[in-house]
Amino acid sequence: MSGPASLSDLAGRMAAVVGARNCFSAGPDLLTYECDGLTHGRTRPDLVVLPGSTAEVVEVVRLARASGRPIVPRGSGTGLSGGARPVPGCVVVALSRMRRILEVNLEDGWVRVEPGVLNLDVTKHVSAAGHYYAPDPSSQSICSIGGNVAENSGGAHCLKYGFTVNHVLGARLVLHDGKVVDIGGPALDAPGHDLLAALVGSEGMLGIVTEVTLRLLRKPEATRTFFATFPSTDEGGEAVSRIIAAGILPAAIEMMDRLAIEAAKAATGLDWPDVGAALLMDADGPAAEVEDLSARAVKIAREVGALELRLPRNEAERQLMWKGRKSAFAAVGRISPNYLVEDGTIPRSEIAPVLREIESMARDNGLRVANVFHAGDGNLHPLVLYDARNGGEEERAENLGGDILRMCVRRGGSITGEHGVGAEKAAYMADMYGESDLETMQWVRAAFDPEGAMNPGKVFPKLRLCGEKPGPGGLEHPAVKSGEVQRW
Amino acid sequence: MVTRERPGTAADAVQGAVPRLVLEPSTVEEAVEAMARAAAEKLALAFVGGGTDLGLGGRPSRLDAVLRTGALSRLVDHAPADQVVTAEAGMTLAALSEVLARHRQRLALDAPFPGRATVGGVVAANAFGPRRARFGAARDLVLGVSLVRADGVAARGGAKVVKNVAGFDLPRLMVGSLGTLALLTRVTFRVHPLPETEGTVLFPGLDVDQVRSLSAAWRAAQLEPVSAVALFASDRLDLGVRFEGFEAGVADQVGRLLELSRKAGIPGERLPAPGAAGFWARHDAVRERGSLRVKLSAPPSRLGEMARSWLPTLLGELSPGAAAVYPTLGLAFASGEPASAAGLVAGVRDARAAIVAAGGSLTIGEAPAAIRPAVDPWGPPPPSIDLMRALKERFDPERRLAPGRFVGGI
């Protein structure tokens, strides 16, 4: 295929593939695609294309590559790390038209879907039959399965049930050159390397996923939720540690600090008290087991000094408690004109000292930080509050966010528990991993995409390759090929 | 310190390939040096932990040196409060269990040969046991790895926390890679609390339809066993279902399962501790004995063919032969002594053709030398084989790490 000569030529050829309505290079629609859920750092793409099938994705990828343009795949655009942020001169391939549920097999416990299907719609589709799809990011009513696969999304209940990677059985992948490859499938342990493990969480850098086979779980028989408040996050953290130490594996165990509680109350009108920490725990499983686990956990919460314990009387009350938690990010908008959402992980046992350190770091910077977190697995979501109208405050907030992530790494944790690295945290990867670690990850990328054409500029920090020899076998580094770095 | 080395002997052979050199690093630093030396001297390598899965895959097409990880067996770090443990690759599952048990924890990976199988080997071979039904396999429990690449450079992937999505997933990519991509030197796992109690219910002498209806019934009733295994006993199946946890939950689930079975007219009983140990020992024997051992995988809905056709095809060629089915996972194992090489080759070929057509696979875990040349250890390569070759080319362009042992001759 000869490469399209100009952008308008390319747009014309793309339109012939996907239809004129599903391809645009100007106009108000383009604005939506300049960023994802991380709304600062906008970049205008050359072209946005919305293919409707695997065959169309293949054509779109071939055309884009023939024109020499990088490709940025996109799901619902709800990501919080800039993973779907365009790069200059790119073609954004948005999968939101591909939202069919293709096949359900309850006996074997799987569903095959297109990537634009929304996370919650999978569960809705099989709910009447008593099944569900376990990963439940807070954005589950709007985020797509394709995006979940790219980011290896988690959610409150991944403490017990694992992440997207634990629930993807197979995928159809369109590679950088338009080849279509099927990976995995409904039977376990297909011979060969675990390419699904490489694919899930690769942030759109290995190809475009056009079908995904997801594991479905049988709904647990019972779920018991309790809400407990504590004078401070010290006692809350202690309760979490002791619940876990007692051999209890909660389905979810979430904590919010004083500022986050204040925000959630302002946003939802919940009658939560003004306290230093609130804990929300789900236990699920067979009814008798759940009653037992829940009673044990409640007893521990009392012993540790819970101020108040609430048990929902019905499912509606339970949903309301969770609503307070799940709306926490947006709720912070009620108490601050602007905020940054961070996402770091620390060893669970260090929650209390880390929160104190965050508080002191915030004070030193003249800023406030609200904390909402998955306490069971040490996944913090510090929300750095600021007012962009105050000169320099946004920059201070960004610096504080970065310092918090570095502190997570110093404590033996990670710069991201579930939001991904994306464009936003690529710079911090070098704090967590050494050069050889990152180089090894680049080998994985290069095996799928030697050109570095898929979603360039994400995950990997800008490398200095001064004096470095080409990779093994004389293979060129994908970051060099993609133009992300130059040798010098 | 310098890596201990000695000439290879027949005892160091990998499927009959005898290395001329054996390297036995006792620290991670020594392992890095040994790998750098192997790179400089362009040695073809195989990595050996406890040697419990050396029958998996093909015979290495070249083998200059075996790198044994047995002396690399220290506990690196155990944070009980975080339920995370890091061990050197050569630590055995049994040694790790002992350390974890002091804190009432365990690695929920009940692979065969715990006294010999090493954590690195278990990851590399994707070894697992019946608790996979509840806790998953190595890919569901591994959090981080330290490795040494073919070029002798050390690298790390993952983290020491349960929740981490930073960077590409090197730890899970190592699972099942059988030493074709890198040497594992340390592995970090998520661990779980030891259960307060367990209960095993035995339903002896079932036919496969009864196994299916009973497992469908407990699924419908939302019971959550940690393992379910059906052992072949002549032409019947003995089904064992195990629950673990706190006493209240276990007792309740055992009682409800027995109630379900009574309604279905299937007699069963909760085994006292010695009886339960006996049942699971019978299972372990299927996994650990026999000069032939194969693994079958298919969608769980194909259980009928698994029990009525594919396994009997293999068992017909084994004398004695045994088989264990994990009905909820669609996995099964057959093992035993071949009656005749030619018959077994035909049996494997027929069973494999049928199971591959059903979307599954049949892989050789152990086989007598006589049938090796006639049977592909993996079966037909998957459609994604080109990506696997590309991966191998990046990680090991000189093809020195276990060449020829993996799928498609990788």
Image: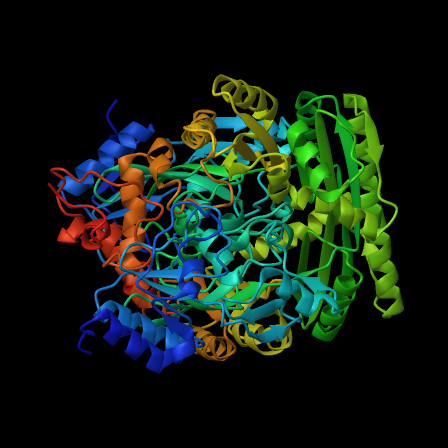
Whether residue B274 sits left or right of residue B394 in the image: it is right
Quadrant including the N terminus of chain B = top left
Judge whether B304 appears above or below B56 on screen. Answer: below
Residue at image x 46%, y 32%? B87
Comparing A474 with B262, the one in front is A474
Residue B170, x across and y down, in percent: 38, 46
Asked whether residue A55 is in view, the answer is no
Comparing A395 with A454, the one in front is A395
In which quadrant of the rendered view does residue B101 lie? Answer: top right
Residue B7, x across and y down, in percent: 22, 38
Give the color scheme: rainbow, by chain, secondary structure or one colour: rainbow
Whether residue B372 sits left or right of residue A227 in the image: it is left
Whether residue B324 sits left or right of residue A273 in the image: it is left
Residue at image x 61%, y 56%? A140
Residue A484, x across and y down, in percent: 23, 48
Comparing B141 with B317, the one in front is B141
Judge whether A344 appears above or below A137 on screen. Answer: above
Asked whether residue B344 is in view, the answer is yes
Residue at image x 42%, y 31%? A402
